[in-house]
Image (cartoon, rainbow, N blue to C red):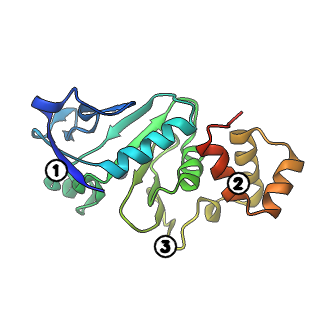
Amino acid sequence: MAVKEYSYEKNGNDRLSPHFRVKEFRARRGGKLDGDRILISEELIEMLEKLSRAVRYKAIIVTDGYRTEAYDKQLTGKIGQHTKGLAADVWVDGYTAYELAAIAELLGFDGIGVINKRCIHLDVRGYKSYFVENSQIASDTYSVRTFLCPETYHKLVQKLFVLNDNTIEYLKKWKWSDLLFEKLTAGALA
Ligand SMILES: [Zn+2]
C-alpha cells in the first residue's frame, strides 16, 4: 500500500477514512505547524480504522502523525517511522497505554511503543518491534505479553473482552489470540 503526500493548506479537511482527516497527521513542532507537507500511509489509516472499531469508535486522538526529519532528529535523536508517514502516536479516553498496546498487538500493528500511561506509538514499518519509552524494554521477538506477568495480561484481556475464566481457559487451549482477533475484527466486544 502506498504512502501519499498531502498539503495541510489544500487537503487538511479531506477525509482519509470514516474516522480520520488529513490535518490530524500534520507536522508539528511543539504546538506549531512544521511545514505544509504531510505524508500518510494508507496501511496506517486502515490499521487505525481497525483500532477505532476495536475501541467501539471512541475518538482516537493523534498527538503526533507525520514529522519532518529535522524535527524527529531533534526530538528522538534519529530519523524514525514518523518521517516516512508510517507512524502515529495516539491515545483513547478510557484506555491505558497497555490496554491499547494489547489491542494493537492483536490487530497486527508492526511497531508498538508505550510512551506513557495513556499514549502509545503505532506504526506499520514492515517488521515487528516493541518498546517502552524511557526504559530498557525493547523486543524483536515482540509481544506485549512478554512484558506483563501472566496474571496482569490475563486481567487485561478479561477487562477488554469481558470474558469469564472458563472462556479464557477455552481460548488459551485453542490458540486464544486468533480467537480474540476474530472477536475484535467482528466488532463482537462486550
Ligand atoms: Zn511515535
Q: Where on the picture, by quarter, is residue 100?
A: top right
Identify the mark at residue 10; answer none if there is no mark.
none
Question: The disc labelled 1 sits on which kind of residue?
Answer: Thr
Q: Secondary structure at mark 3?
A: loop
Question: The disc labelled 2 sits on which kind of residue?
Answer: Leu
Crowd rating for badge 3 (residues with CA inside 10 Å; few <14, some 14–19, many 20+): few
Identify the mark at residue 179; answer none if there is no mark.
2
Q: Quadrant of the C terminus?
A: top right
Give the residue pinned by disc 1: 68
| Sequence-wise first label, 3 or 2 | 3
Mark 3 vs mark 1, CA separation in Å: 26 Å
Q: Are marks 3 and 1 in contact (CB under 8 Å)?
A: no
Give the residue pinned by disc 3: 140
Location of residue 34 in the rendering, given as x and y in whole percent from the top left corner: 13, 40
Location of residue 85 in the rendering, given as x and y in whole percent from the top left corner: 25, 51
Q: Is residue 15 left or right of residue 54?
A: left
Mark 1 vs mark 2, CA separation in Å: 39 Å
Location of residue 99 in the rendering, given as x and y in whole percent from the top left corner: 60, 45
| Sequence-wise first label, 1 or 2 | 1
| Sequence-wise first label, 3 or 1 | 1
Would you place residue 131 above or below residue 35 in this image? below
Mark 3 vs mark 2, CA separation in Å: 24 Å
Count of numbered labels shown in the rendering = 3
Location of residue 54 in the rendering, given as x and y in whole percent from the top left corner: 57, 39
Image point 42% across, 68% down: which residue?
127
Image point 59% across, 59% down: which residue?
144
Q: Secondary structure at mark 2?
A: helix
Question: The disc labelled 3 sits on which kind of residue?
Answer: Asp
Q: Is residue 151 left or right of residue 62?
A: right
Crowd rating for badge 2 (residues with CA inside 10 Å; few <14, some 14–19, many 20+): some
Crowd rating for badge 1 (residues with CA inside 10 Å; few <14, some 14–19, many 20+): many
